[in-house]
Image: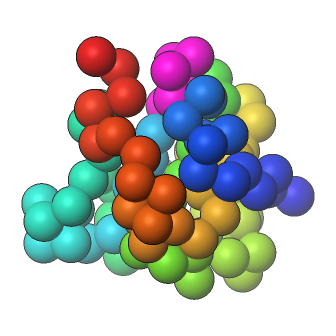
Amino acid sequence: MPILKKPDEALTLIQNQVTLVDIREPEEFAADRIEGAKNIPLSLLMTFVPCLEGDILITCRSGKRTGEQNYPLFKKLTAGEIFILEGGMNAWNAEGLTKTPLI
């Protein structure tokens, strides 16, 4: 099962070099994103599954697309741990966290 992380916990993971995967569509990603995130839309994951190394943190807008129903797709991305940003970008923005966590 995926491990839910609150925004402040997710920030720590990102700063520790976890791979951040944003599964929103490209238009959503272009409008609001965390620097360094890889945009792999959920619609693309239905047909193409890239292999990523290590642990990953997955986000969307509100947390709906990162729900348990899509966990089997996410598990195909990596052999590492899968973390989910609880509440997605809405929660990240509500906390006022930086969009450039690696600087």
Q: In this view, does 3 lie to the left or right of 92?
A: right
**In the image, residue 40 lies in the stretch drawn in magenta:** no
Q: Is residue 55 left or right of residue 50?
A: right
| Residue 23 drawn above or below residue 8 | below
Q: In which quarter of the image is the C terminus?
A: top left
Front-lying residue, 72 or 85: 85
| Residue 39 drawn above or below residue 93 | above
**Residue 54 position in % (x across, y down):** 63, 23
Q: What stretch is highlighted in magenta?
A: 14-19
Q: In this view, does 34 lie to the left or right of 46?
A: left
Q: In which quarter of the image is the N terminus?
A: bottom right
Q: Quadrant of residue 96?
A: bottom left
**Residue 39 position in % (x across, y down):** 29, 52
State the residue at coordinates (26%, 53%).
33
Q: Is residue 2 left or right of residue 40?
A: right
**Residue 2 position in % (x across, y down):** 79, 55
Tell me, what colour scheme is on the image?
A: rainbow
**Residue 28 position in % (x across, y down):** 21, 72
**In the image, residue 18 lies in the stretch drawn in magenta:** yes
Front-lying residue, 60 or 45: 60
